[in-house]
């Protein structure tokens, strides 16, 4: 496989449907300002979970996402419009930052595992159980017990 060609993102919409189901279940509230989102992102990136699976990394910057319809992350930066500033969406984007292995699909099993673990760790086990059920209902594949990508660690 060419180094700049990732595997097909075959479960993208299924992951999004599971995420939306979690949002609906939690009645997710906005984190508010970009500064509040940045503080939450900093707390995740400084956590033990992050260090063990991703390693130390420079700060992930949060931008306001003006002109975007939805949140997105690339190369250490998250752009997040006002309507997307919920904890599940921020964790969704952080999961992309945690799984930066170009040999994996963008929403592949590694990504789905990272998102699930972030939800369990930073929202709670009940939310994680709900996301698991939503994954199963949508046919999302994930790697149980995922421990990170060795190539992404320093």
Image (tube, rainbow, N blue to C red):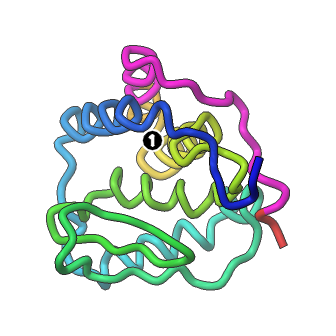
In the shown orientation, is residue 123 left or right of residue 105? left
Q: Residues within 10 Å of mark 1 (few under 14, many from 20)?
A: few
Give the residue number, with chain letter if any, for mark 1: 124
- Residue 147 on the magenta span: yes
Residue 60 percent coordinates (x, y): 53, 79
In the shown orientation, is residue 72 left or right of residue 111? left
Residue 149 percent coordinates (x, y): 77, 53
Q: The C terminus appears in which quarter of the rendering? A: bottom right
- 152 vs 66: above or below: above
- 79 vs 16: above or below: below
- 59 vs 114: above or below: below
Number of numbered tags placed on the structure image? 1
Residue 18 percent coordinates (x, y): 34, 31
Residue 31 percent coordinates (x, y): 24, 67
Q: Quadrant location of residue 25? A: top left
The residue at 21%/70% (across/down) is 68
The residue at 57%/84% (across/down) is 59
In the shown orientation, is residue 5 left or right of residue 39? right
- 31 vs 145: above or below: below
Residue furthest to the front in view is 2
Q: Quadrant location of residue 71? A: bottom left
Tag 1 secondary structure: loop
Residue nearer the viewer, 85 or 121? 85
- Residue 10 on the magenta span: no
The residue at 67%/45% (across/down) is 104
Query: Start and end of the magenta stretch?
Result: 130-151
The residue at 38%/29% (across/down) is 14
In the shown orientation, is residue 1 left or right of residue 85? right
């Amino acid at each position: 496989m060419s180094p700049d060609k990732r595997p097909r993102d075959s479960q993208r919409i299924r992951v999004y449907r599971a995420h939306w189901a979690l949002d609906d279940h939690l009645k997710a509230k906005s984190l508010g300002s970009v500064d509040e989102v940045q503080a939450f992102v900093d707390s995740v990136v400084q956590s033990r979970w992050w260090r063990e699976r991703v390693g130390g990394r420079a700060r992930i910057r949060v931008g306001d996402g003006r002109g975007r319809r939805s949140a997105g992350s690339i190369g250490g930066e998250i752009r997040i419009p006002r309507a997307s500033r919920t904890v599940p969406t921020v964790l969704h984007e952080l999961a992309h930052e945690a799984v930066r292995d170009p040999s994996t699909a963008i929403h592949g099993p590694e990504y789905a595992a990272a998102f699930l673990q972030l939800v369990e760790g930073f929202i709670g086990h009940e939310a994680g159980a709900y996301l698991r059920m939503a994954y199963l209902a949508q046919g999302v594949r994930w790697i149980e017990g995922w421990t990170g990508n060795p190539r992404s660690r320093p």
